[in-house]
Each structure stands twice: as structure tokens, then as C-alpha cells.
Image (cartoon, helix red, strand yellow):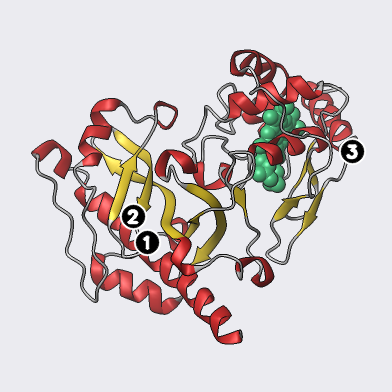
Amino acid sequence: MKRGFWISFGIAAFLFAGVQALAQDDEGEAQPEKQKGSELPAARGDAVNGEKLFRIHCAACHGFTGRGDGAAAKHLAVPVINLHDGGLMNRRTPTELAQIIERGAISVKGSRAMPSFKEALSPLERWDIVAYLETLYPKIQDFFPEAGRFTVKKFDMDDTGKSRIKKLLESDLSPAESSLVLITVFKGGSERGEPRNIPYVPAELDNLKKEDKLGYLAFFDIPGPKGSMSVGMAIAPNGTILKLSGTDALGVNAADNRMLKEFEGQGKRGSKPEPFKARTKPANVYAAGVFRGWVRMIEAVYGFERDEKDRTWAD
Ligand code: HEC
């Protein structure tokens, strides 16, 4: 018998042991069930112990550092997610992450992609892993310290949007660039110091008032001389860049962040927004990439605002 077979067989057995814990919402996104078990512990988990446990229990699929490139990943029917992706990871509060580890995850297509760790890990060990996961990606509070609630939606650019962007950038968007996960952040209503994730459904979104909106956050790659950098961009409702930065985990160091900072305060919505310019020459290498990301983000913001207007009219 080939070794590959036993690896696949082992994983398959593993997957069937998974407890189905996530209900589907109408977007087809897997949503954790409401609060049960996995309550937030009094103290934060221990990230150092969490990292050790991650290597033992999670790295086979998620990769040694969580980038989704584990040895077993290629044997799975669904792609393993990159745990450094701020757009994906910020969809989940720490409590939800603890629940995902406890119960396992089912993929959007319904297959049990990730097993339950209810038996293999104690609740405290699961919280240690959550503490480690939280070190891997930039968090909403890093961009919006006042964040109380947020809602997340992936927007696909329609043809009107695509041609608008094409005119501005004088180049086409790649298929991957034609959609963007947009996080809309509001003040007030946090629970236990943790911003609350509001499901993207009309009944819930009605409680998010326009006057409480702090701005928008998205994560994307910008090309640069050293290869591409993964950054987070926070903008105010009027389009101005509030914060643009990456973390070590995203391959962005302090010098890069100083350059990215030069773009803060730029960005104004209008029919023909001005391309960005940095003060210093090295930072200007990133200007086109930052502008490209910003334009995609504004397009997603139009999508959010369209939904927002529809809701107001329905009242
Ligand atoms: C058998 C392979 C496998 C193992 C082992 C595994 N995962 Fe996963 N995990 C996956 C796959 C595949 C997905 C993507 C599921 C999907 O597409 O819905 C995933 C998704 C996730 C997600 C995102 C879920 C979501 O819906 O946002 C988190 C967080 C996660 N895993 C953490 C962990 C942690 C922590 C461990 C170890 C305790 C672990 N995983 C072990 C395969 C695995």
C-alpha cells in the first residue's frame, strides 16, 4: 500500500470524526453557532504554549507558520485557509475561533474540512491556540481602536465598477482583484472588550447606524521591489486613508511601515481621484500599488453603501 493512500485515508477518517458545528447563512458563508461552550476565559490564553500546540495539531494542514501550506493540505478537497489573512481572520472573533477549534469547520461546499478538537485539546489549550492565532494577523482594533461592532462582506465588482476602475487605472483588474473582503467598522456595542461581528443580514445590519460608522478596513497585496507586501488599509467614510500598515507576520517591517505611512491622509472620493504621491522617493515605489488597492476598496465601499441605502428605503 502506498504511503500517500494512508495519509489520505487517515485524513478522511479524521474529517468524518468532525462535529458539524457551523450553520450556513444566506451568503453561503459558514457561520459559527451562537455562544455555547467556549466562553471567553477570565485570562487571555498563553500564545507561547498555543504555538507549540499549533505545531502539533494544526500544522499538518495549515503549515508550520499557518500560511496554509501544510503537507496534508494538498490531499484535501477544499483549500486550507491562510491564517495570516486579516480579511478572513477578522471575520471571526476570538470566541468564534475557539468554537471553530472545538467543533471543527465545514467548508462552504459542506464538506467537513477540518476536524473537531473537542477531545484532543482541553478548553484552556484551545484558548492558548486562539492567543497564538491572534498574533498572526493584524486586528481591527489595530486600525480602529474605538471599534465596537463590525460587519464583513466580500464584494464582487460588477461590470460598471470594473470599467470605472479600468478608466482610472488604465489597466484591467485580474480575476483575483475583482473581489474584495470589506470590513465596515462601527463604534459602540462591544462585548467584553471584544468588537462584535454583526452578520451581514438586513435585520442585524439595521442596528448599525450610519452616524456610528468609523470607516472601512481591507487587506490586499501591493507589489514592491522586494516582492509583494500584504497590507491593511483603513479609510474614513469620505475615503481618506487613516492607516496603512502591515505586520512582521505579513512580511512588512518597520522601514516598510514608515514608507506606507506617507500615504496616510491621502485619498479623496470623487469622479476622478488623484493618483497618490509619497514625499520620499523610496516610498513612491509603492504609490501605484497603494492607489490600486484604494480604488478597489472604494468600489467595494460603493457596494456597501448601495446595500445601506436599500435598507433605509425599506424602512
Ligand atoms: C485536516 C486538516 C486540518 C487540520 C488538522 C486543521 N485544520 Fe483548520 N482548516 C482546514 C481547512 C481545510 C479549512 C478551510 C475550511 C473551509 O474552507 O471552510 C480550515 C479552516 C480553519 C479556520 C478558519 C475557519 C473559518 O471558517 O473561518 C481556522 C481558524 C482554523 N482552520 C484553525 C485551525 C486550528 C487552530 C487547528 C489546530 C487546532 C486546525 N485548524 C487544524 C483544515 C485543517
Q: Is the CB–ligand 1 distance for label 3 below 8 Å? A: no
For label 2, being within 8 Å of ligand 1 is answered no
> Which residue is the site of mark 1?
296
Front residue of this view, candidates 68 and 295: 295
Please give the residue where the numbered disc 2 appears in the rendered image.
Answer: 293
Give the x, y percent position of residue 37.
Answer: 83, 36
Q: Is residue 275 at all visible to an observer of this figure? A: yes
Q: How would you rate the neighbour count of disc 1 (Cα within 10 Å): few for under 14, some for 14-19, many for 20 or more?
A: many
> Which quadrant of the view contains residue 258?
top left
Q: Residue at the spot x=33%, y=55% of the render?
A: 293
Give the CA separation, mark 2 to mark 1: 5 Å
Of the residues under marks 2 and 3, which one precedes in the sequence? 3
In this rendering, the label closer to the viewer, 2 or 3: 2
Write down the residue under mark 3. 16
Instruction: Specify whether 26 is left or right of 281.
Output: right
Report if residue 72 is visible in the image.
no
Instruction: Determine the secondary structure under disc 3.
Output: helix
Q: Which residue occupies 59% across, 24% down? A: 132
